[in-house]
Amino acid sequence: MRFFLPLFAALALVPPVLSAGQLSGRRAPGFALPEVVTFNYHDLYDYRGKVVVLEFMRSDCPACNTFPKVVEKIRNQFGPKVAVLTIVMPPDNANTVGAFIATHRFKNPILFDMGQVAAVYMKVTPKNPTVSLPHIFLIDANGWIKNDFPHTAGTEAIFDGGEPLLKELEAMLTAAPKPAGKQPAAKK
């Protein structure tokens, strides 16, 4: 019993980032969305072979306004191995996103969704009508959602400094690649 007490205490100290989010463990829904400013389309399938950080945000959200610094850290640390795509929905528009890009000197694509992609990723139903913003999904090179992070008190470090997110990305990149054929069964 003495062995188990320190083990349980150690497990209690493990940050929540290490456990998969409730929207993880399934194939990432496909999409093709236009970039807000240039109207170039980005298809998630075009990013196969790379790890993708998919962020759902609003340009006027305080936590979303700290995340561009994290995106810059991702770009500096991982280069082209990790793609970062940001998705916005109404009431954001070309003007609000343009101001966001200018303020933060944001270099990654910001895509415009009318809500359908967000609804599929966040499993919106009449019983679960909530879209939590900001929300980050980590998609592996084979197109599977490995983790997701809504902005909560337990995930603030991901959105503010990004260190837990960088560690998670490093682990995804160093993990042995799995064959593209069979994947784990999707959660229901």
Image (cartoon, rainbow, N blue to C red):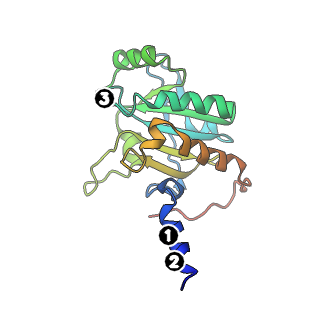
Q: Are the two marked residues, 1 and 2, in contact with CB atoms closer than 8 angstroms?
A: yes
Q: Amino acid at mark 3?
A: Pro
Q: Earlier in the sequence, mark 1 or mark 3?
A: 1
Q: Amino acid at mark 1?
A: Ala
* Rendered position, 109 above or below 11: above
Percent coordinates x, y for residue 148 in the rendering? 47, 49
Residue at numbered disc 3: 90
Q: Are the two marked residues, 1 and 3, in contact with CB atoms closer than 8 angstroms?
A: no
User: Which-is-in-front pick, marks 1 and 3?
Assistant: 1
Q: State the image quarter where residue 72 is shown.
A: top right
User: Which-is-in-front pick, marks 2 and 3?
Assistant: 2
The mark tally for this picture is 3
Alpha-carbon span between mark 1 and mark 2? 6 Å
Q: Earlier in the sequence, mark 2 or mark 3?
A: 2
Alpha-carbon span between mark 1 and mark 3? 44 Å
Residue at numbered disc 2: 5
SS at mark 1 in the image: helix
Crowdedness near tag 1: few (<14), some (14–19) or many (≥20) residues, C-alpha within 10 Å: few
Identify the residue at horizontal 50%, vertical 39% (top origin): 54
SS at mark 2 in the image: helix
Percent coordinates x, y for residue 91 in the rendering? 28, 27
Identify the residue at horizontal 50%, vertical 70% (top origin): 9
Q: Amino acid at mark 2?
A: Leu
Alpha-carbon span between mark 2 and mark 3? 50 Å
Q: For this rendering, which residue is in front, 56 or 3?
A: 3
Residue at numbered disc 1: 9
SS at mark 3 in the image: loop
Q: State the image quarter where residue 160 is shown.
A: top left
Q: State the image quarter where residue 126 is shown.
A: bottom left
Percent coordinates x, y for residue 5 in the rendering? 51, 77
